[in-house]
Amino acid sequence: MDNSTNDNAAVLMVRYLDHEMPVEEKKDFEEKMANDAHIRQQLDDLLLTREAIFQYGLAQQVAHIRQEMLDSRADHSLPAPKTARVRRLIRFSISVAATLFLAWVSFEAYQYFSISPSKIFSQQFSHYELPVLRSTEQKAVSELEIAYRDKDFNRVVKLCKLSNPSSLKENYLCGMAEMELGNYADAESTFEKIILANETNATHIFKDESEYNLALAYLQQKKYQKAIELFNSIHNNPFHLYHNKVSSHFIRSVKRLR
Amino acid sequence: MEFIKSASDTAILQNLVTGNSFEDTVKWIYQEHFDSLSWFIKNNGGNSQDAEDIFQEVVVSFIDLVKKSRFRGESSIRTFLFSMNRNLWLNELKRKGRALKRELKYQTNNDYTASDIQVGIVHKEEKEVLIGLVEQLGESCKKILVLFYYGELSMKEILERTDYESEQVVRNKKYKCLKKLEAMINEKPAIKQTLKTLLHG
């Protein structure tokens, strides 16, 4: 069997796995599978792969919930033991704990005095790069998008103000251009508009990106409470595009700015 | 939250199977059971971190069993989780080459859960290797595969959460990522065996 035949068979297998076959095609496929051990083996391998993804997803989701729960819990302590040997152990443990505590205090003090909105922003902000277009797609690109691809952010902002684009993608480019230019108040308005449009229309077009960058725009304008609320909501959503960029440690850093 | 205050085992199991109020349900399990189960571990040679790690594994394994209809419901959820917690901790101690100097407290003779719990125990370490394997896929592959196969989102919904040009592009990417993971799993017979047991029992 040559490579293209193998690839077609593999694609067919995935379609079957994903329940994307019409009834008749599925029936034919199942008949073929009943008589072909090799196909059954291939399907088994795919089922195992799907199981791996399920186990990963479940572990991640529970880990996320765990972290939320544990962040809000007080520490439990065991009752104090009474033997002399254990008392010596406790004294030793206290001295180790004191040393670690001093180290932690020094680290936290360093963090406290060295942290700033600009520093956090520079660490967290990602420039938005448009995907490369095929030649057939290039003709349909708007002037605004061309300006963005050329990184002419001043021109992007000018075009945004002149044309008041309706597409969420172009609005997103406007918002990101504002961010690149440091016009955080304007970026805030644009991202809020995108988020509201998505909520109104029950869509999800550049919604995650807008939420994340809106939070950064709040940060740069020292609107810390709003930034923290938005970062918290991103952190609490394991399916958010920026979930991995907003850790508990990061949120604590932002809270120190208040 | 009325549900949390009055949740019955039936309601909990139903929510875990259907995915309704899933996060609230898992939080309820934590609220109701974490303290007692963690106390057990901390009084039997473990520390807070051990208790947290083991409890998380208990919850993941329990949900997995429920979703695959392998939780027979012959005892309460509390009893089942306790048994699983105890057995996972014993296994962890053996793995670390540690033995308890005194008898474990609260021994029970409920062996009916032994085979179900054993599945969770035997493969805990392999699960950690499995998680590490999936992590190697890279962010874009992980995201698409988890959203589709775990989150059960449609191509359209995944497209809205990603930066691809069309549903077909997402579908193509998903296919490549799936085949990549399949190849990685095929290179690790031990992982493959673990997955077979997790999937088929």
Image (cartoon, coloured by chain):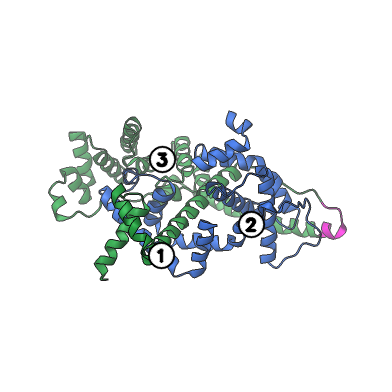
Chain colours: A green, B blue
The one of A105 and A12 positioned closer to us in this rendering: A12
Mark 3 or mark 1, whichever is nearer to me:
1
The amino acid sitting under disc 2 is Ser
Q: What is the C-alpha distance between the residues marked 1 and 2?
A: 27 Å
* Magenta residues, start to end: A81-88
* Residue wearing tag 2: B115
Q: Is residue B11 visible?
A: yes
Is residue A84 magenta-colored? yes
Identified at 83% across, 52% down, the residue is: A81
How dense is the environment of label 2, judged by Cα within 10 Å: few (below 14), some, or many (20 and up)? few
Tell me which secondary structure the magenta stretch mostly adopts. helix
Q: Mark 3 points at which residue?
A: A215
Q: Point out residue B10 in the picture as x, y percentages from the top left corner.
A: 60, 37
Name the amino acid, label 3: Ala
Spatial CA distance of label 2 from label 3 is 49 Å
Q: Residues within 10 Å of mark 3 (few under 14, many from 20)?
A: many
On the rendered structure, is A197 left or right of A90? left
Same chain shared by disc 3 and disc 1:
yes
Which residue is located at x 61 percent, y 47 percent?
Answer: B72
Chain that bears disc 2:
B
Residue A88 locus on image (x, y percent): 82, 59
| Looking at the image, residue A190 lies above or below residue A108 | above
Subunit ID for the residue under disc 3: A
